[in-house]
Amino acid sequence: MKCKNGCRFGIMGGSFDPIHYGHLVLAEQIRTQFYLDMVYFVPVGAPSHKKDRKLADKLSRYEMVVMATMTNPYFQVSRIEIDNMDVSYTIDTVKEFRNNIGQDDTLYFITGADAIIDIETWKSCEELLSLCKFIGATRPTVNDTHLVNKVNDIVQKYDADIQLTTVPALAISSTDIRNRVKNDMSIRYLLPESVESYIHKKGLYRHR
Ligand code: ATP
Ligand code: MG
């Protein structure tokens, strides 16, 4: 991809188990706020955390992300982590992206702001912070001085580029959707219809 003055790419990692409108709103809002040329959704294969729970199989999670993002020309799905048999670390994914883009291009890692707080526990955090910029999203109603202070500390300590922004509050989570399916409650309007049909057809989350 060629862009004037370098491209701006967003990477949005997640288990997407399943993908829902919270993820899609977050990605779209940040894409437009930060003038990103493309947002890559990266479903995790074998995650390094969340070991407490077995995820739905990676192909299903990948297919749901593909279906959900299909109508947005600025969204793409990367198989990089699901094709990796080992545990996926953000540092490895970001390096791989870096190797495949131009010198002038910029990478933005998009995440919920709560994840930013723990970034020092991520593998090779210092190197990671030097390879890409971070965008942490909070809800508009959250006035979290703890979060802002923590982010300022990390920015100072590592000379990092982390920006906090707000996206419309959506109290949607994959955990809640899985629980609803298990308890025979409706998940309609929480995620795209195609993903809802896929979940029901494949019988995902019924027994977990
Ligand atoms: P789970 O409930 O299983 O933890 P999740 O809904 O948090 O799932 P993840 O796949 O863990 O989804 O999240 C991927 C990314 O999307 C994370 O950066 C997370 O902070 C962000 N995210 C998840 N839900 C929302 C939401 N409703 N609004 C904005 N961002 C969200
Ligand atoms: Mg989560």
Image (spheres, rainbow, N blue to C red):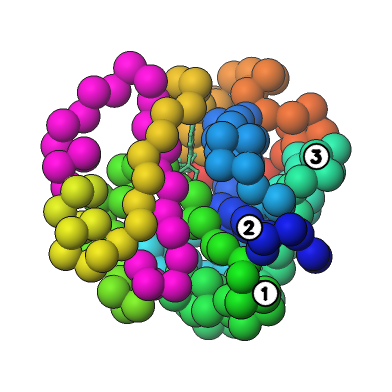
Q: Earlier in the sequence, mark 2 or mark 3?
A: 2
Q: Measure how far apart labels 1 and 2 are at the Cα level.
A: 9 Å
Q: Measure how far apart labels 2 and 3 are at the Cα level.
A: 15 Å
Q: Which mark is residue 101?
A: 1
Q: Which mark is residue 9?
A: 2
Residue 204 seen in the figure = yes
Magenta residue span:
128-150
Looking at the rendered structure, the kind of residue marked 1 is Ile
| Viewer-side label of 2, 3 | 2
Report helix, strand or loop for mark 2.
strand
- Residue 47 or residue 131, whichever sits in front: 131
Q: Residue at point 19% right, 48% down?
A: 152
Looking at the rendered structure, the kind of residue marked 2 is Phe
Residues at marks 1 and 2 touching, judged by CB atoms closer than 8 Å? yes
Residues at marks 3 and 1 touching, judged by CB atoms closer than 8 Å? no
Residue wearing tag 3 = 72
Q: Residue at point 46% right, 65% down?
A: 132
Q: Measure how far apart labels 3 and 1 are at the Cα level.
A: 21 Å
Looking at the rendered structure, the kind of residue marked 3 is Asn
Instruction: Confirm or reject: label 2 Cβ below 8 Å from ligand 1.
Output: no
Q: Earlier in the sequence, mark 3 or mark 1?
A: 3
Few, some or many residues within 10 Å of mark 2 (<14, 14–19, 20+): many
Report helix, strand or loop for mark 3.
loop
| Viewer-side label of 3, 1 | 1
Q: Residue at point 80% right, 65% down?
A: 1
Give the vertical position of 84 relative to 6 (above or below).
Answer: below
